[in-house]
Image (spheres, rainbow, N blue to C red):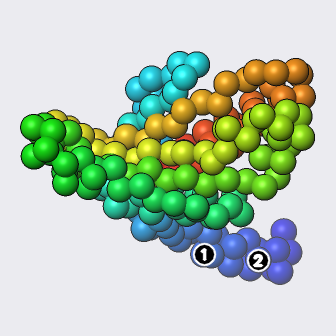
Amino acid sequence: MSEFRTRTRQAARRVTAGLPALALTAALAFPLPALAYEVVEESEERVIYSVEGDFDHYFEMVEFAIETEGLVINNVGHIADMLDRTAGQESGEGIYLNGRSVDFCSATYSRATMEADPHNITFCPYVIAIYELAAEPGTIYMSYQRVPQIGDEASQESLGDVNELVDRIVTEALMF
């Protein structure tokens, strides 16, 4: 073996000797998502996911996931706050520690659904609920209503695409 090859191999060993420690340091400093969420319910009408964590964090992740899709949030409903304000009138107890809904729309997806059937306007905007039950502090739920796949083939396909979009947004938010 030539002296050049020997020195090259020795240099390569010195450089790569620290890689396992570097990889471990990177893994600890930048952990991958744990995928600790679970599907609580999946029916024709709705999908509910849960994850352990902080409500504000996951609310921000939903906002981020919507914006990452290039979409704009139309409205944030403060559902838990409304229920708290009216609890005395309704003689009810606190149901939620936190609870909001986020509604948004997609010009691309909505146009496809409404070109297929103009009456599909009733399915816009899309809504995701993010909430924490008073009885289960630290468990964050994200849920949405599924859009029914009705009408002709083009309508059903475009409405199915909406369901995939909303589910993608929710699962993206749950990853972090």
Secondary structure at badge 2 equals: helix
Quarter-of-image position of residue 51: top left
Residue lying at 68% horizontally and 78% vertically, measured from the top left: 11
For disc 1, the neighbor class at 10 Å (few under 14, some 14 to 19, many from 20) is few
* Residue type pointed to by label 2: Thr
Residue 144: give x, y in percent of width and height: 52, 37
Label count reads 2
Task: Report the residue that reaches farthest toward the front.
Answer: 89
Q: Position of residue 109 (x, y in %)?
A: 79, 46
Marks 2 and 1, how far apart at CA = 10 Å
Image quadrant in which the N terminus is located: bottom right
Question: Where in the figure is residue 7, as x and y percent of width and height?
Answer: 74, 79
Contact, CB < 8 Å: mark 2 with mark 1?
A: no
Q: Is residue 142 something one can see in this rendering?
A: yes
* Residue lying at 58% horizontally and 19% vertically, measured from the top left: 44
Q: Residues within 10 Å of mark 2 (few under 14, many from 20)?
A: few
Q: Is residue 83 above or below residue 71?
A: above
In this rendered view, identify the residue nearer to me: 176 or 168: 168
Earlier in the chain: of badge 2 and badge 1, it is 2
Determine whether 13 is above or below 115 in the image: below
Q: Residue at x 44, y 44 (%)?
A: 129
Nearest to the observer: residue 12 or residue 41: 41
Residue at image location 73% in from the left, 41% down from the top: 121
Which residue position is annotated with label 1? 14
Q: Is residue 46 above or below residue 132?
A: above
Left or right of 155? Residue 50 is left
Q: Quadrant of residue 56?
A: bottom left
Q: Nearer the viewer, residue 138 or 144?
A: 144
Q: Which element type, helix, strand or loop, lies under badge 1?
A: helix
Name the amino acid type tagged 1: Arg
Query: Closer to the camera, 4 or 123?
Result: 123
Give the numbered dot on residue 8.
Answer: 2
